[in-house]
């Protein structure tokens, strides 16, 4: 028997969303976690991608480089753009046909829209926004289940959720919660074309216009360096100073929710529970007190430097290093010192 | 006549929740419950279109009797009818079992008085799942537009709606057949000030209470904990990260603190090369 670990490969305009590769990495780890059971039963674990769209071969091949054993492809001109009902029907059909044990979907706007519909249509359980996933026995000796852990109550509590009697065990995961797996030079396996067409009865809505946002090229979730500001900046102008430092460090500017609510900066920059989850190499938190809702969005950063006037600010609890002081003194000093460091390199 | 239904939830105000540092338990005492903020904007949008099209708004919620406060708040905003779906048998429902109950109720309301638009907030701030709206749409086999930011047009004669939704990278304008389900962002409508007649009406308003006893019947196997595919295995508090060194500029001076910080930052794997600086 094959035990299938599925990942929904999300694409928009023929480009894969990076969260799909992150999830292939997770699926591979989950498959490895049941090796002991496989040895006993002689079953095989397969990591498989599912891809719906039109002319997606390149994306499918890329999925194989990120460790998928198989990629199921549904290609139909009517599936060029995502729409809830046709995509839900196609995935429901595939799930019923192949009976995966686990199915992971990115917790993007598209993924959340789709996963909730597919879970209902298939009749199974779905855990949203998981931050930790493992295959484990709820009781010793019992078969392993997907242990899906997620924050609740604004990040104040974490809960581990099981889906005992229904399959697949579904979970959504926000981008950047898990690291990118390394890309394999060789793609070892198969692209399987599924012969499904989208019939008119599957279509109950159409996209009449696509409005591309201006100035939304800030990719705070995939930045390696983030210089983030909070209420402690005092005003919108403070972000100009942070932008200078971010530019010197080759990074982008992030913000706490308070600043976005105060219209100091646009929502694209918001980090935290209601904004983006980030995991940069370097996160500089300037004037951010560190409410739990902010921390859950950035605590996986490799190095967190917190700058705050209040020595009791909760942000210091998770900071790799803290500076208690005035950010309007600290940030300019940082700009000067990084410039000096770079200049010294050029001289030598 | 235009008829909108809004499904709302009363939630603990998560911004006020604290953890007892000794027992690690959630301190629920004294935490106010509020109408889920996204739902409030959904109600505002429904009322706005009711006024434009001379229609009617029905509010439903599944929850404890205390949720009546939130229903009254919706009446105050201009809704016409409110139904509390409350029964011990519903307790412990996950999103799947919740969407079952809501679907049954929505179908009953629709039978009495056909619906055009069914509104949800994009998610509830206590669970943050965003699953119930799409789940109900699938059960009803209706189009769903999630993350809606603007209603461009509601055409009850030709039975379609044009709604703008927001994704990470763009906005999409979607034309869907009526009746349709939508889940709303806050931009969908501003919360109106209550008019005096609505305010007075809400004070005396008694919501209908629907239970497993009636007026409609539910399949007991699909209710509450028993009807939920997912169960909570365990709960805990988030892992605490280890705090690093903290320097005070008042003691070390600004430049020394910053230099110490850079020394550490450049030790982080990949950072020095990324910045083009040698250690």
Image: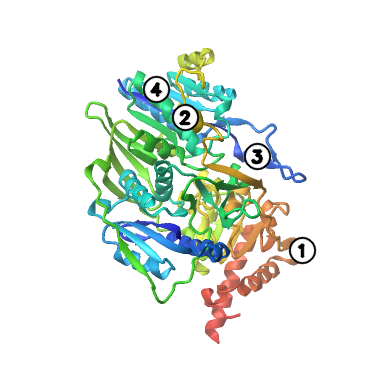
Disc 4 sits on a residue from what chain? Answer: B
| Numbered mark located on residue A48 in the image | none
Instruction: Indicate which label's residue lies in the foreground, 1 or 2.
Output: 2
Residue farthest bottom in this picture: A348
Quarter of the image for residue B67 reads top right
Specify which label sits upstream in the sequence, 2 or 4: 2
Residue wearing tag 2 = B101
Q: Are marks 3 and 1 on the same chain?
A: yes
Asked if residue A43 is positioned above or below residue A255 in the image, the reply reads: below
Residue count near mark 2 (Cα–Cα under 10 Å), binned few <14, some 14–19, many ≥20? many
Number of marks present in the image shown: 4
- Picture coordinates of residue B38, whole percent (x, y): 48, 36
User: Which residue is at 51% across, 41% downward?
Assistant: B229
- Picture coordinates of residue A217, whole percent (x, y): 40, 58
Residue count near mark 3 (Cα–Cα under 10 Å), binned few <14, some 14–19, many ≥20? many
Instruction: Indicate which label's residue lies in the foreground, 4 or 3.
Output: 4
Disc 2 sits on a residue from what chain? Answer: B
Q: Are marks 1 and 2 on the same chain?
A: yes
Q: Secondary structure at mark 1?
A: helix
Q: Are marks 3 and 2 on the same chain?
A: yes
Specify which label sits upstream in the sequence, 3 or 2: 3
Specify which label sits upstream in the sequence, 1 or 2: 2
Alpha-carbon span between mark 3 and mark 1: 35 Å
Q: Are marks 2 and 4 on the same chain?
A: yes
**Quarter the N terminus of chain B occupies:** top left
Residue wearing tag 1 = B251
Residue wearing tag 4 = B108
């Amino acid at each position: 028997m094959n035990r299938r670990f599925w990942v929904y490969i999300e694409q928009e305009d023929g480009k894969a969303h990076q969260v799909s590769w992150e999830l292939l990495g997770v699926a591979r780890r989950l498959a490895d976690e049941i090796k002991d059971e496989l040895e006993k039963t002689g079953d095989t674990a397969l990591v498989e991608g599912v891809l719906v769209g039109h002319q997606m071969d390149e994306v499918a091949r890329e999925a194989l480089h990120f460790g998928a054993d198989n990629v199921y492809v549904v290609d139909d001109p009517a599936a060029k753009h995502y729409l809830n009902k046709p995509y839900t029907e196609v995935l429901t059909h595939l799930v019923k046909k192949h009976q995966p044990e686990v199915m992971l979907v990115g917790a993007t706007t598209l993924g959340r829209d789709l996963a909730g519909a597919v879970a209902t249509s298939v009749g199974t359980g779905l855990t949203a926004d998981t931050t930790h996933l493992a295959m484990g026995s709820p009781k010793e000796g019992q078969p392993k289940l997907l242990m899906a852990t997620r924050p609740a109550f604004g990040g104040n509590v974490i809960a581990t959720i099981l889906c005992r009697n229904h399959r697949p065990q579904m979970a959504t995961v926000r981008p950047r919660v898990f690291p990118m797996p390394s890309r394999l030079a060789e793609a070892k396996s198969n692209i399987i074309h599924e012969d499904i067409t989208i019939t008119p009865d599957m279509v109950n809505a159409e996209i009449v216009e696509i409005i591309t946002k201006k100035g939304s090229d800030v990719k705070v979730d995939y930045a390696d360096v983030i210089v983030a500001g909070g209420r402690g900046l005092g005003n919108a102008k403070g972000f100009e100073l942070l932008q200078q430092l971010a530019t010197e460090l080759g990074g982008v500017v992030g913000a706490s929710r308070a600043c976005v609510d105060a219209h100091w900066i646009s929502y694209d920059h918001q980090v935290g529970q209601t904004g983006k989850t980030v995991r940069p190499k370097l996160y500089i938190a300037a004037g951010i007190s560190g409410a739990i809702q902010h921390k859950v969005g950035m605590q996986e950063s490799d190095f967190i430097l917190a700058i705050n006037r209040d020595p009791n600010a909760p942000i210091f609890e998770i900071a790799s290093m803290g500076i208690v002081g005035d950010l309007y003194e600290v940030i300019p000093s940082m700009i000067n010192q990084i410039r000096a460091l770079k200049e010294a390199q050029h001289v030598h | 006549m235009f008829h909108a239904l809004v499904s709302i939830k009363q939630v603990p105000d998560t911004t006020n929740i604290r953890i007892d540092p000794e027992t690690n338990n959630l301190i629920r005492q004294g935490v106010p419950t509020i109408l889920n903020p996204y739902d409030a904007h959904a109600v505002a949008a429904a009322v706005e279109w009711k006024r434009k099209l001379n229609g009617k708004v029905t509010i439903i919620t599944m929850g404890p009797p205390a949720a009546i406060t939130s229903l009254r708040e919706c009446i105050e905003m201009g809704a016409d009818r409110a139904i509390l779906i409350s029964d011990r048998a519903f307790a412990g429902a996950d999103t799947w079992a919740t969407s079952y109950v809501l679907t049954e109720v929505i179908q009953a309301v629709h039978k009495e008085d056909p619906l055009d638009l069914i509104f949800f907030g994009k998610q509830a701030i206590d669970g943050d799942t965003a699953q119930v709206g799409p789940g109900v749409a699938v059960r009803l086999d209706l189009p769903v537009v999630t993350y809606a930011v603007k209603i461009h047009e509601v055409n009850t004669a030709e039975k379609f709606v044009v709604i703008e939704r927001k994704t990470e990278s763009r906005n999409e304008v979607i034309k869907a057949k009526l009746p349709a389900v939508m889940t709303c962002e806050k931009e969908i409508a501003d919360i109106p000030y209550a008019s005096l007649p609505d305010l007075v009406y809400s004070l005396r308003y008694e919501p209908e209470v629907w239970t497993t006893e009636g007026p409609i019947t539910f399949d007991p196997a699909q209710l509450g904990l028993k009807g939920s595919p997912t169960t909570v295995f365990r709960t805990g508090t988030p892992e605490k990260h280890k705090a690093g060194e903290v320097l005070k500029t008042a003691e070390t001076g600004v430049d020394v603190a910053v230099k110490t910080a850079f020394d550490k930052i450049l030790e982080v794997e990949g950072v020095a090369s990324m910045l083009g600086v040698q250690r």
